[in-house]
Amino acid sequence: MSIEAPLRPTEEFYPSGDEYDKFLSRRKRRGRIVQMIFLLALATAVLALITLLYTIINDSFGLTAVVNETEPEEVVASLGYDPAEVAIEDLSFDELVGVLQGAISNNVGRRLEREQRFYEDRLVFETESVWAEICSSGEPPAGCDAAPRSQASVLQLVYERVVVPDVIASYELVPSLFAPEAFEEEIEEIFITSPDRFPDYTFDQVQFEWRAWLSWTFVTAPANSKPEIAGIRTAILGSMWLVAITISFAVPVGVGAAVYLEEFARPNRFNSFIQTNINNLAGVPSIIYGMLGLAVFVRIFEPFTSGAIFGIENDNGRTVVAAGLTLGLLTLPVVIISSQEALKAVPNSLRQAGMGLGATRWQTVRSQVLPVALPGILTGTILAVARAIGETAPLILVGAASFITSDPTGPFSKFTALPIQIFQWTSLPQEEFRNLAAAASLALLILLLVLNAGAVILRNKYSRRI
Amino acid sequence: MTHETQAPVTKQEEPATKVDETTAEGMPAPEAPGVIQTVGMDIYYGDFKAVHDVSLNFAFNEISALIGPSGCGKSTVLRSLNRMNDLIPTARTDGEVFYHGENIYGEGVDAVEVRRRIGMVFQKPNPFPKTIYQNILWGAKINGFKGSKSDADALVQDALEQAALWEEVKDKVNESGLSLSGGQQQRLCIARAIATKPDVVLMDEPCSALDPIATLRIEELMLQLKENYSIIIVTHNMQQAARVSDKTAFFNVELNTKGQRTGELVEFSPTEKLFTSPDRKETEDYITGRFG
């Protein structure tokens, strides 16, 4: 092409002159085509990811048509404030309790107080004598021991019991941004053409509000059958308990097994048989682990998983610990394999250096091999745990409760988990639960992201230590 | 005689009686027994015989060089002198290796103890990914070093001084061992090896990954170390063997009927003699470049 010097004449088997130019451009073209295909593959993956995020975010935020039983402004105004200046969130604790007191019956109030009291030092709905009596009875209610309600909890109650918002329709994010008036027209049309759909309300009562389905209240509120006030605190806590138990089971066992297989086991038939089995176990569908967990942890080990041997009363072994151990088993092969890979990547010269100084094998592994392998082990482990946190099938089998409002308090609690909650919401008919499911998916993704970020930070910290 | 592939068998040893037994039976050599003696050593990898019938006597406080063409088993012989070959699952050593009169392949001898007494420096510098200080102190610690912090400091300084590295690194002992140049890393590995107070240091082609200047420094260092240590070195570089060693062993490869290449000791003589008037024709061919 551009090189003037003639090719060496003897090389008759090689193309020369124009022929070479064509040959060269053909080779380059081929390279460009392949590069193009790879770029397309990457674009497909990115597109899929964007679509996923778009769908979830689109459903998680947007305009809603809400009818409140009592407007928050009215509540504020009833206390003598100017609604233009003070929002309901700005009210003090005492004012909120006062609003509640004025709005709900004494019976309901007593029930709420028995769940969790309002003040440390005084009672609002109960009388001291009755309270003392029920708290010294055989089965005292939760409120006797629990810490008093927080500001957020009381505000939640005010929304739940006084404001009582009813979302009658919701709109997706993108049309909400670009054509909000279309939504209002749509709702108005419904009221005109089919008044039977919302028999209790008139169009004038409807307010159009922006709503972030994924909000702090959503994250901190417990599950509820009303989509307006339902939250995922129970599910998040359940998922975190599961992750904690999964990690504390799968990581020590998995890393230990990997260290044995890589550093101590002699290559023989038995060990290669075990190795093959571990590799195969990594591919076993998760539902099968669920069946295993049901049979072993829920049934056979029931005295342990139900907490009976620790003096905890439970009807059965469908608890956090049973599900956590099941997920631990599920992740175990992946933890073992990735830890093995990390150990394999440690140069042999380090082992020789250690042993050559008169260290035992364990001393060498402990001080020289494991520290070098640690970042890799962490990466593999976190990927495995990320898989576990999104698992639904085994949890359904092991018996995660699909509807539960009390937070898990320990390894022997009944529980639900984020994926279970999402699954349950998507199967409900009301449209608003679809928004909740999307918001919960977003929360699950964020939780995963946080876990992964934590792992990356940990890994970088260890790999920087010389 | 024995081969040791399992984990160390026993903790309780009876070295005193053992020494007497083995010295009584297995001391055929008429010359003065050196620090390490091999008697009829055969080394196998699985079914393959890598080295055949090696009998050598390495003297105290001398540098002994092992030379020979590729694949002649000189590294294999070296690694069997402190039982590093045990780390290869299929490797097996027959025959006897006496260290201060005791067969290191004998029953009740723990490979870990052998390696603590017979240190090793490898072909490629392999410092631990830790600080220079930790690199040196770790070997001492795992061998039960009981000194105080100042004793440890002194140990590190002493080892680095002996390895002629102290002047270069004294201000940065808390930096990574990997931040040093190749030649410095190799001297760090030597310092690390001598910090556990061995009396023999095995060196497996210690300069093959280094430039000529670094090589020269290591050679000078070896000549200094010889005062306190017995050194056995494998080298590809005949000039190096000629420059530093007191005695040289020449190994050659023999093709057996199955087409396997088995290494064999051809000659073990004082270096000067081996390079000027070798006893055997093969040796002369090799050192004059007429190898084949």
Image: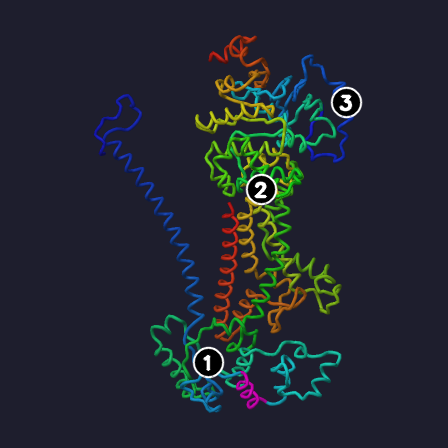
Whether residue A315 appears in this view of the structure is yes
What residue is drawn where x is 52% and y is 55%? A455
Magenta-colored segment: predominant secondary structure: helix
Q: How many marks?
A: 3
- Between the C-alphas of marks 1 and 3, the distance is 98 Å
* Amino acid on which disc 3 is placed: Asp
The x and y percentages for residue B146 are 66, 40
- Farthest left residue in view: A4
Q: Residue A369 carries which label?
A: 2
Residue bearing the label numbered 1: A168
Element type at mark 3? helix
Magenta stretch, residue numbers: A93-104
Q: Nearer the viewer, mark 3 or mark 2?
A: 3
Residue bearing the label numbered 3: B20
Query: Up-down: is B221 above or below A61?
Result: above
Query: Up-down: is A398 above or below B278?
Result: below
The x and y percentages for residue B115 are 64, 31
Element type at mark 2? helix
